[in-house]
Every structure is written in structure tokens, then in C-alpha cells.
Image (cartoon, rainbow, N blue to C red):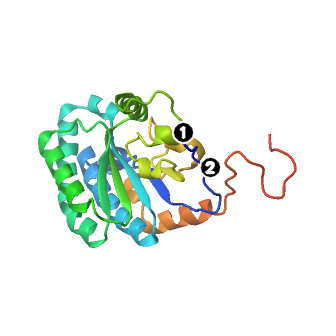
Amino acid sequence: MKEREAPSPDEGIKHLAIIMDGNGRWAQTRHRPRVWGHVRGAKIASRITEHASRLGLKSLTLYAFSTENWKRPEFEVSLLFRLLEKFVADEREKVLKNNIRFRVIGNRQLPEKALLKVKSLEEESAHHTGMILNLAISYGGRDELLRAFERAQAAGVTKLTEEGFSSFLDCPEHANLDLLIRTGGDGRVSNFLLWQLAYAELWFTDMKWPDFDEQLLENILRKVSTRERRFGALSEGKEHVRT
């Protein structure tokens, strides 16, 4: 099997991922219940998805619910999945209109009603050729790696290359992440897209997700595009390795 080549530094931002953090704290600072922040956050996710599609991104992955989020209070988990059902229903028209391919990544152990809505939109948009919208739900990076190994074993693969292993990930089409944005002020990746992050640019902002907007997204993309991405090689025109 042919090894995967490192992506070219000239390819630009094709796969963007966002950890949409800070919804609950945003609401609490306004003396409102956490749910209010999640509702606002879902609206921002809708706007950013549509704008990312207009900008020509190939793939957008939004971290909506982690495997660790199941530890939250039962009423909040239940609410988050009701919001998911509403988001999928509300986004259906935009997904179909904008040629977006919708997909959920994660272990897919979701409440039945939410899973049915997810599967329905996945099937409706499966033939679309525009941006891929990945919602990471009940997702953990380590869990994805373990599931990828299990898929490889089930396929009878005994020796893996990087390219071969990538084909068993939840989103094999875009196994290389170009940029990760995290809102909310924390400076960690929180078990998100661990394999895909290998050469990704990272952008952390104190701004909470409900305050994020299209202009800020464009500003970040513009600034990141000026960074030199060497993928382990020397800088162009440089004779010495930076230490």
C-alpha cells in the first residue's frame, strides 16, 4: 500500500475543526441558565457552517458532545440531545440547498430519536459534493483510534501504514486537519481528533462560542494563512533547523 504523502504547505485551510466551548459560562455570566447558552451556541454553529461553506472549505468538524460529556447531569444531557434534534431539523434545508454533506462522527451510541434524525439527513445528503459537515457527537479521540484499530482487525489487516490506518477513521476523506479553533479560554485539545491534529495549526481564544461570528472566523483564517507550515521540513530558504 502506498504511503500517504505529507500535505503541501500551499494547500491552505481545507479541513477546519472547532471546539465550541463556553456556552454554559456565557449564559451564567448573564445570570441565565446554562441551557440559554447552548441554544445560542446552536444558532452560532448554524451561521458558521453556512459561512464556512461559502468560503469554500472542504470539511468542517464541530465538537458538539464528547464521550466525557455523558458525565454531566442527566437533565443537561437530555436537553443537549433535544437541541441536537432541533439543530438537525433546522439545518436540513440549508444542508440540501448548499450541497453540504452531513455526517455524525463518534461511537453513535445516541438516543434513538436523535439517531433517527441524524441518519435521515446523512442519507439525504450522502450524494452531495460540497463541504462535509461533521458533527462530533459522543466522540472521543482515543475512542476513535480504538474503533479504527477494531475496524482494521475486522478487515483482516495485519500491517498498517499511515494511509491505511487513516482509511479506518470516522472521517477518512479528510484525515489531516489544517486548523483547530477552540473558544472559551482553555488551551487544550480535550481528546479531540488526536490523529488528525498531527500537523494542524492551533488557535485558542478567550471568546466564548456564543460571541463567535463570521468576521472573526475570516480574521483567524487570514492570520493562519500567513503561517509557514513546514510539516517537519526546513523553512524555505533556511539552512538550519529551528530548535
Q: Is residue 7 visible?
A: yes
Q: Front-most of 210 and 180? A: 180
Place of residue 85 in the rendered image (x, y in percent of width and height, measured from the top left)? 17, 51
Mark 1: amino acid: Glu
Q: Which residue is mark 2?
A: 6
Disc 1 packing (10 Å; few <14; some 14–19; many ≥20): few
Q: State the residue in front, 163 or 62.
A: 163
Q: In the rendered view, does 147 fall on the left or right side of 194?
A: left
- The answer to whether residue 33 is seen in the rendering is no
Whether 161 is drawn above or below 174: the answer is above
Q: Residue at x 41, y 29 (%)?
A: 149
The alpha-carbon separation of the residues under discs 1 and 2 comes to: 11 Å
Percent position of residue 62, x then y: 38, 51
Mark carried by residue 162: 1
Q: How busy is the neighbourhood of tag 2: few (under 14 within 10 Å), some, or many (20 plus)?
A: few
| Amino acid marked by disc 2 | Ala
